[in-house]
Image (cartoon, coloured by chain):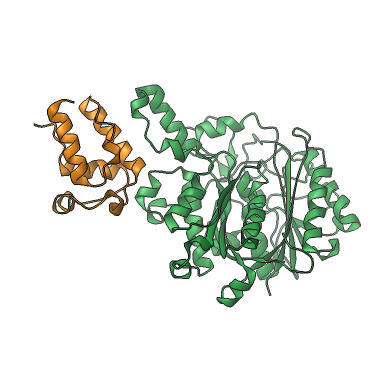
Chain colours: A orange, B green
Amino acid sequence: MSDRLTMEELAALMKSAGITVDPAELTSRPDSRFDDYGLDSLGLLGIVGELENRRGRALPTDADRCKSPREFVDLVNNSLMTGA
Amino acid sequence: MKSRTAGPVAAITGIGVVAPNGIGAEAFWKATQAGDSVLDRVTRQGCEHLPVRVAGEVRGFDPGSLVEERFLVQTDRFSHYALAAADLALEHARLGRADYADDPYAVGVVTAAGSGGGEFGQRELQRLWGRGPRYVGPYQSIAWFYAASTGQISIRRGFKGPCGVVCSDEAGGLDAFAHAVRAIRQGSQAMLVGATEAPLAPYSVVCQVGYEGLSTGDDPERAYRPFTAKACGFVPAEGGAMFTVEDAAEAVRRGAPVRALLAGHCATFTPPGRPEDSEGLAHAVRGALREAGCAPEEVDVVFADALGTPEADAAEAAALREALGAYGSKVPVTAPKTGTGRAYCAAGTLDTAAAVLALEHGVVPPTPNVFDVCHDLDVVTGSARVAPVRTALVLSRGRMGSNAALVLRKGP
């Protein structure tokens, strides 16, 4: 499942939104809020757009409303696995 | 702005400058007072072949060392200048988070902007055309917008008071102060006020090419010489200034440095395309003096708009005679912007910064590159003039017909 979203890839995507975060921190505290990392809703929307371009498929419309890394990664990976 | 009996309600307590001739009030004043000209050939990428040859570029500005990355990726260069200048203005006023932590609604932000984030917008639109709509980033929705700087300053510093953006042509830089004074009158404790511009990017420069009055000269020493027989228009500049404006009594109570009082302002409008019109500017001067309760002879220095075309320069000289009478030919007039360029909306704010510093230091800075004045004005040329400066008048005009005048009084 090479196209699963990992915390490493999420951290790299957050970097493009100007947020520097260690993937290990996302992994150890997956329920911290994006807000607390300084990532706002437009930032997450940009990450969703970039992921959709990378995977060549649409993500669920509520993807950019996720509050935490765990919620986001789970939603994206469920979507990718079910092909929804 | 004030009634004659009440006295000025608002004080400038902090100045934050990001200008072609210096970053920070101290560096800016040193260069301004010395009459250094930093005008130079435009070097910004993609602009080299365009017909605007000379400008005032802000060099040596490292936004990454001043503003967090997440704010930088969301914003254009004009907001980078504003965010950095706002920090400097707060620091200069010694106004920290502890001062408003209990009441974030007590502090607001008002800025003016002429064109917003052209460089950011161009990059995203090139992605749109080159790769398609899926490649346009979400921050395009806010970064190009002329309101971006007000929004980002308020978000970054946690200011929840009245926030606004003045879109009133180039004179908006002075009008922003009037909005801030109104907010103070209505109960705000402090306002971050000012304007910054970043017009030196390819799309933005192309937009300016048709401007009447824009100099296309390629000699930095000759491209911008208002009030002389060689006047051939103005050269653009980037950067600008932000100010901390506070309730004057509150500022004194908290021991803040009261650098100047905002005593009077007036804005007028004249039809666009009539640079020879002096009436609108004269009326703005009279209105600002009336609000300040200031007689013409009390004005110690005028910071001129200095558009730099023969008609507009003659109109500015005529406006001063119409509003100040015979004293209009005697009052010291300066235009330090001939050394840095004319920064659209931000020009009035940089002049206000220079005016406040002139009040503090008792020195009228000179007008670089200008010699042999051909109007009936006492333009300060060559070197700075030491003089008691208690009252300064700052003028600004826009190419679409706006005029504004601001009267500043020395602090107590």
Residue B98 in percent (x, y) is at 44, 70
x, y percent for residue B261: 68, 66
Residue A83 sits in which quadrant? top left
Q: Residue at horizontal 36%, vertical 23%? A: B132
> Can residue B48 be seen in this snapshot?
no
Quadrant in the picture for the C terminus of chain B: bottom right
User: In the rendered view, would you say B68 is above or below A4?
Assistant: below
Q: In which quarter of the image is the N terminus of chain B?
A: bottom right
Left or right: A57 in relation to A17: left
Residue placed furthest toward the right: B326
B138 vs B234, left or right, is left
Comparing B54 with B159, the one in front is B159
Q: Position of residue A5 (x, y in %)?
A: 16, 37
List the single residue furthest toward the left.
A1
Q: How many marks?
A: 0
Position of B322 relative to B236 (above/below) = below
Residue at left offset 73%, top offset 49%? B404
Provide residue B77's location: percent of width, then percent of height: 47, 44
Residue at the spot 30% in from the left edge and 32% down from the top edge: A49
Front in this rendered view, residue B197 or B13: B13
Q: Residue A59 occupies which quadrant of the picture?
A: top left
Query: For this view, does B323 lie left or right of residue B262?
Result: right
Residue B45, compared with residue A34, is above or below; it is above
Asked whether the viewer can see residue B345, the reply is: yes
